[in-house]
Image (cartoon, rainbow, N blue to C red):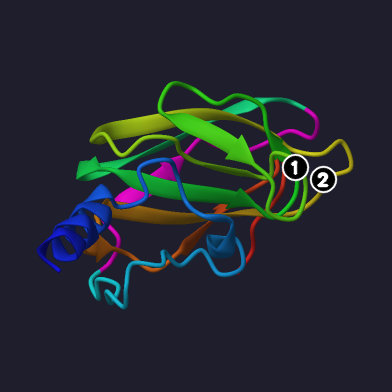
């Protein structure tokens, strides 16, 4: 019985060390044993500027403090590289998602994103950040605007 309890605690402390599971694709919600999302605004942002169709661009996830896990899912287009500590995988299309491949603490992650050649208008990148197993934020969609688009509102 004691061995079972110890094994259970070890499994929980691992906190998806090899990346988000495939079931996180649908909504971007971590499966952290009923841990509720943080209610405050996510203290992380995705930066990269405006996009041009079929032109690779760098996207950087960073913010206040370090994080151990993340998932970025593109509404269209693909990610081209998987820097150290990350991996590409397929949610709906090949390489439309990038996540962590280890749960080491990260200050930032920079990935290369390729918008499709026929892209027009805004492109959404859904981002989920996990600071540690018990601290995570609901997914937030960051919008990339196309170069030359005029935003009115």
Mark 1 to mark 2: distance in Å? 8 Å
Relative to 121, say whether 139 is above or below.
below
Label 1 crowd (10 A; few <14 / some 14-19 / many >=20): many
Relative to 108, say whether 16 is above or below.
below
Label 2 crowd (10 A; few <14 / some 14-19 / many >=20): some
Of the residues tagged 1 and 2, which is closer to the observer?
A: 1
Tell which residue pokes out farthest to the right in this image. 118
Q: Main secondary structure of the magenta part?
A: loop
Q: Position of residue 133 (x, y in %)?
A: 24, 57
Q: Which residues are magenta?
A: 41-54
- Classify residue 64 as left or right of residue 130: left
**Which residue lies at the image location 43% right of the left edge and 21% below the top edge?**
84
Q: Which numbered tag is attached to residue 138?
A: none
**Which residue occupies the foreground of this view, 86 or 5?**
5
**Which residue occupies the foreground of this view, 29 or 47?**
29
Residue 22 among magenta residues: no
**Which residue lies at the image location 47% right of the left edge and 32% below the top edge?**
86
Circle 1/circle 2 CB separation < 8 Å: yes
Q: Earlier in the sequence, mark 1 or mark 2?
A: 1
SS at badge 2: loop
The C terminus sits in image quarter: bottom right
Report the residue marked by disc 1: 77
Relative to 58, say whether 129 is above or below.
below
SS at badge 1: loop
- Classify residue 11 as left or right of residue 55: left
Q: Position of residue 96 (x, y in %)?
A: 68, 45
The N terminus sits in image quarter: bottom left
Q: Position of residue 66 (x, y in %)?
A: 21, 40
Report the residue marked by disc 2: 119
């Amino acid at each position: 019985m004691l061995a079972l309890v110890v094994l259970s605690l070890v499994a929980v402390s691992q906190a998806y060390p090899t990346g988000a599971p495939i079931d996180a694709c649908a909504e971007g919600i971590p499966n952290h044993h009923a841990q509720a999302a943080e209610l405050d605004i996510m203290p992380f942002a995705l930066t990269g500027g405006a996009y041009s169709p079929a032109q690779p661009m760098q996207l950087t996830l960073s913010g206040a403090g370090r994080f151990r896990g993340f998932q970025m899912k593109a509404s269209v287009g693909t990610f081209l590289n998987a820097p150290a500590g990350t991996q590409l995988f397929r949610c709906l299309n090949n390489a439309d998602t990038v996540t962590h491949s280890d749960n080491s603490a990260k200050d930032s992650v920079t990935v290369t994103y390729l918008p499709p050649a026929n892209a027009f208008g805004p492109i959404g990148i859904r981002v989920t950040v996990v600071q540690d197993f018990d601290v995570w934020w609901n997914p937030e969609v960051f919008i990339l605007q196309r170069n030359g688009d005029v935003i009115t509102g």
